[in-house]
Image (spheres, rainbow, N blue to C red):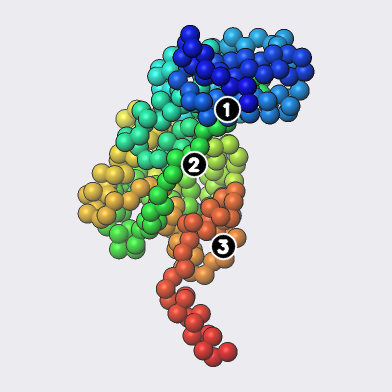
C-alpha cells in the first residue's frame, strides 16, 4: 500500500500509478486505516469504470452535486423534497467543499450531530440519502470515488413490534377528530403507508368499483387497493374540501405531517404510545391471526421483500398450541 503521512499537513495520503497515470490524494482528519480503505476503493473504481480520470474535471462543489441530485429526484420521485432537510443539514455542517475533498470524517460529523436526537435506524436512513447524492455524483463522473462506500451502518436494536388491540382501537377512534378517525380506519383496513394516505386524491377513489389507487411515496408506483364496506362508508361521508381526501379545513391544503396530531390523539385515548406507522403493523398482525397466508399479506402491504412482511407478522400462541395438538393425533 502506498499510504504515507504528509508531515507538512499532518494528513494521511495515498499515491499510486494506474495505467501510467499517478493518483495522489490527502485526507485531512482521516486515519491511516481509513486512507488505506480509500486507496483500495479508488483502485477498485478505476478498474470498474475504466475511464481516464486525469482528463476529467473534479472541482465540483458539494452544492453542485446536491443540485444535480435534487434535479434527479424531481424528475424521478413522487416526493422529491422528502429528504431535503437531511441533505441541507449535511451541507450546513460540512460547508461548500470540493466534493472530492469530502471524507469519511465529514460523514461521521453528521452522524455525531444526529446521535442522541434520533434513533440509529433514522440516522441510517438519513445516511442512505446522503450516500445517494455521492453515488449519483460518481455515476456522473463528478467525483472519482464515493466517500460513503466505506461507511458502515449503525447497529440498531430490534424492539418488539407494537400492535393495536381492538380495545385500544375503540378508545382511539372515540377521541379522534373526524378526519383523524377516517385516517385511522383507512390505515387499519388497508395497511396503507402514511405517505400514501396523505397523497390520496378523490380522483383516485372509485366508489362504484370498490377500490382506490394509492401512490407509493418512495417511487410513485401506483397500486390498487380494494375497499371493504366499513371503509367505503367512512370515505363517502367525508367532506370534500380540496382535491386531496385529507385536507386542512382552514387552509384547504393537504396535510403534510400528522405525527403530532396522532400522538395527541393517542394521549387523549389513554393508551400506551403507538405510532401511526404501527397501524400498518397492526393490519399485518390481524391478517396473520385470521390465517391469511403471508404472500397475500405481502401483496396487501406492498412489500418488495417477503422478509419485511415476516417482521410485521407473528405466530399467535393459540396457533402454536393447535399445531402441537395436531402432532399428538398424528
Q: Residue at x 42, y 73 (%)?
A: 317
Q: Residue at x 45, y 61 (%)?
A: 285
Measure the alpha-carbon separation of dots 1 and 3: 45 Å
Between disc 2 and disc 1, the foreground one is 1
**Disc 3 secondary structure class:** helix
Of marks 2 and 3, which one's residue comes earlier in the chain?
A: 2
Q: How many marks?
A: 3
161 in relation to 142, above or below: below
Task: Tell me where residue 70 appears, x and y as whole percent.
Answer: 54, 21
Residue picked out by circle 1: 36
Of marks 1 and 3, which one's residue comes earlier in the chain?
A: 1
Q: Residue at x 46, y 64 (%)?
A: 314
Q: Quadrant of the C terminus?
A: bottom right
The quadrant in which residue 298 appears is bottom right
Q: Residue at x 41, y 26 (%)?
A: 110
Residue picked out by circle 2: 196
**Disc 2 secondary structure class:** helix
Task: Tell me where residue 291 appears, x and y as whole percent.
Answer: 52, 70
Task: Tell me where residue 26 appears, x and y as whole percent.
Answer: 54, 15
Amino acid at each position: 500500500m502506498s499510504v504515507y503521512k504528509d508531515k507538512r499537513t499532518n494528513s494521511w495520503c495515498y499515491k499510486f500509478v494506474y495505467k501510467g497515470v499517478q493518483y495522489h490524494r490527502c485526507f485531512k482528519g482521516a486515519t491511516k486505516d481509513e486512507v488505506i480503505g480509500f486507496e483500495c476503493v479508488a483502485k477498485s473504481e478505476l478498474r470498474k469504470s475504466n475511464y481516464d480520470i486525469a482528463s476529467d474535471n473534479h472541482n465540483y462543489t458539494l452544492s453542485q452535486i446536491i443540485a444535480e441530485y435534487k434535479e434527479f429526484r424531481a424528475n424521478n420521485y413522487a416526493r422529491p423534497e422528502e429528504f431535503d432537510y437531511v441533505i441541507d443539514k449535511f451541507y450546513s455542517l460540512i460547508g461548500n467543499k470540493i466534493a472530492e475533498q469530502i471524507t469519511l470524517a465529514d460523514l461521521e460529523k453528521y452522524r455525531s450531530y444526529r446521535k442522541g436526537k434520533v434513533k440509529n435506524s433514522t440516522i441510517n436512513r438519513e445516511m442512505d440519502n446522503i450516500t445517494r447524492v455521492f453515488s449519483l455524483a460518481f455515476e456522473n463522473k463528478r467525483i472519482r470515488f464515493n466517500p460513503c462506500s466505506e461507511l458502515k451502518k449503525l447497529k440498531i436494536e430490534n424492539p418488539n413490534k407494537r400492535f393495536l388491540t381492538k380495545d385500544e382501537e375503540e378508545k382511539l377512534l372515540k377521541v379522534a377528530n373526524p378526519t383523524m378517525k377516517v385516517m385511522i380506519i383507512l390505515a387499519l383496513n388497508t395497511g396503507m403507508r402514511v405517505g400514501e394516505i396523505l397523497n390520496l386524491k378523490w380522483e383516485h377513489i372509485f366508489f362504484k368499483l370498490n377500490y382506490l389507487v394509492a401512490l407509493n411515496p418512495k417511487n410513485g408506483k401506483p397500486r390498487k387497493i380494494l375497499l371493504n364496506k366499513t371503509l367505503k362508508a367512512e370515505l363517502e361521508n367525508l367532506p370534500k374540501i380540496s382535491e386531496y381526501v385529507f385536507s386542512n379545513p382552514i387552509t384547504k391544503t393537504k396535510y403534510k405531517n400528522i405525527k403530532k396530531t396522532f400522538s395527541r390523539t393517542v394521549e387523549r385515548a389513554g393508551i400506551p404510545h403507538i405510532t401511526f406507522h404501527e397501524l400498518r403493523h397492526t393490519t399485518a398482525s390481524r391478517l396473520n391471526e385470521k390465517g391469511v397466508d403471508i404472500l397475500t399479506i405481502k401483496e396487501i402491504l406492498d412489500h418488495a421483500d417477503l422478509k419485511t412482511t415476516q417482521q410485521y407478522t407473528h405466530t399467535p400462541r393459540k396457533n402454536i398450541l393447535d399445531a402441537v395438538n395436531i402432532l399428538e393425533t398424528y
